[in-house]
C-alpha cells in the first residue's frame, strides 16, 4: 500500500510503514515540505494512489463533502509519545491495510480501529 504522511506526524511514521513493506512519503520530502497545502497534499495523494495519513480533521470534512482524498487514515490518538504511536501503528497495521482495501476512511484511536466510510 502507498501512503502520504502529513506534517503533524513524525517522519519516522514512514519508516514504520516501510519496514512493514509499504511505500511511504512524508510531506518533508515534497517540494514545499511541511508547508504543502492540504489541497496540494490531497492532489498528490490522489494522483499517486496514496492514502493520506493525518491527525488533521479538516481532511475528514474534505472527504465527506468533496470526496477527496480518495483514501484517508485519521490518527486520533491524542497526545501520545512517538514510541506509543509506533506501538499502536505497528499493532494495527495489518487491520488498517485490510480496512483500507474495502473502505475510504479509517480512523486509528488509542483503543480501537474504526472503519468510517
Image (cartoon, grey):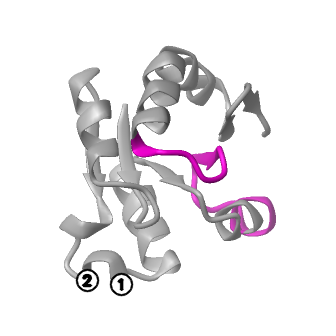
User: Could you tell whether 80 is left or right of 78 in the image?
Assistant: left
| Residue 68 sits above or below residue 17 on the image | below
Q: Which residue is mark 1?
A: 35
Vertical relation: 29 (above or below) 92: below
The residue at 28%/21% (across/down) is 20
Please count the marks in the image: 2
> Considering only vertical position in the picture, is 65 above or below 3?
below
Residue 62 vs residue 116: left or right? left
- Label 2: how many residues lie within 10 Å, few (<14), some (14-19) or many (20+)? few
Image quarter of residue 13: top left
Residue found at x 73% / y 26%: 111
Magenta stretch: residue 77 in it? Answer: yes
Locate residue 68, reporting x and y percent.
62, 62
- Say which residue appears at 55% left-offset and 46% top-offset: 80
Of residue 107 and residue 42, the one placed in the foreground of this image is 107
Kindly identify which numbered label has been placed on residue 63: none
- Could you tell me which secondary element the residue under label 1 belongs to? helix
Q: Nearer the viewer, residue 19 or 101?
A: 19
Circles 2 and 1 in contact, beta carbons < 8 Å: yes
The percent position of residue 96, horizontal first and vertical second, equals: 56, 25
Q: What residue sits right under mark 2 in the picture?
A: 32
Between residue 30 and residue 76, name the one nearer to us.
76
Q: Which residues are magenta?
A: 62-82
Between residue 28 and residue 50, name the one nearer to us.
Answer: 28
The C terminus appears in which quarter of the rendering? top right
Q: Secondary structure at mark 2?
A: loop
- Quote the CA–CA distance across marks 2 and 1: 5 Å
**Residue 48 placement (x, y as % from top left):** 33, 53
Magenta residue check for 116: no
Residue 42 rendering spot, x and y as whole percentages: 49, 67
Is 23 situated above or below 35? above
Amino acid at each position: 500500500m502507498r501512503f502520504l504522511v502529513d506534517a503533524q506526524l513524525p517522519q519516522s511514521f514512514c519508516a514504520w510503514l516501510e519496514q512493514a513493506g509499504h511505500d511511504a512519503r512524508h510531506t518533508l520530502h515534497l517540494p514545499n515540505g511541511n508547508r504543502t497545502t492540504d489541497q496540494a497534499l490531497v492532489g498528490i495523494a490522489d494522483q499517486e494512489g496514496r492514502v493520506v495519513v493525518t491527525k488533521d480533521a479538516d481532511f475528514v470534512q474534505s472527504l465527506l463533502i468533496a470526496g477527496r482524498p480518495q483514501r484517508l487514515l485519521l490518527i486520533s490518538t491524542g497526545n501520545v509519545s512517538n514510541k506509543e504511536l509506533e506501538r499502536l501503528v505497528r499493532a494495527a497495521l495489518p487491520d488498517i491495510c485490510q480496512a483500507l482495501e474495502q473502505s475510504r476512511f479509517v480512523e486509528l484511536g488509542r483503543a480501537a480501529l474504526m472503519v468510517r466510510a
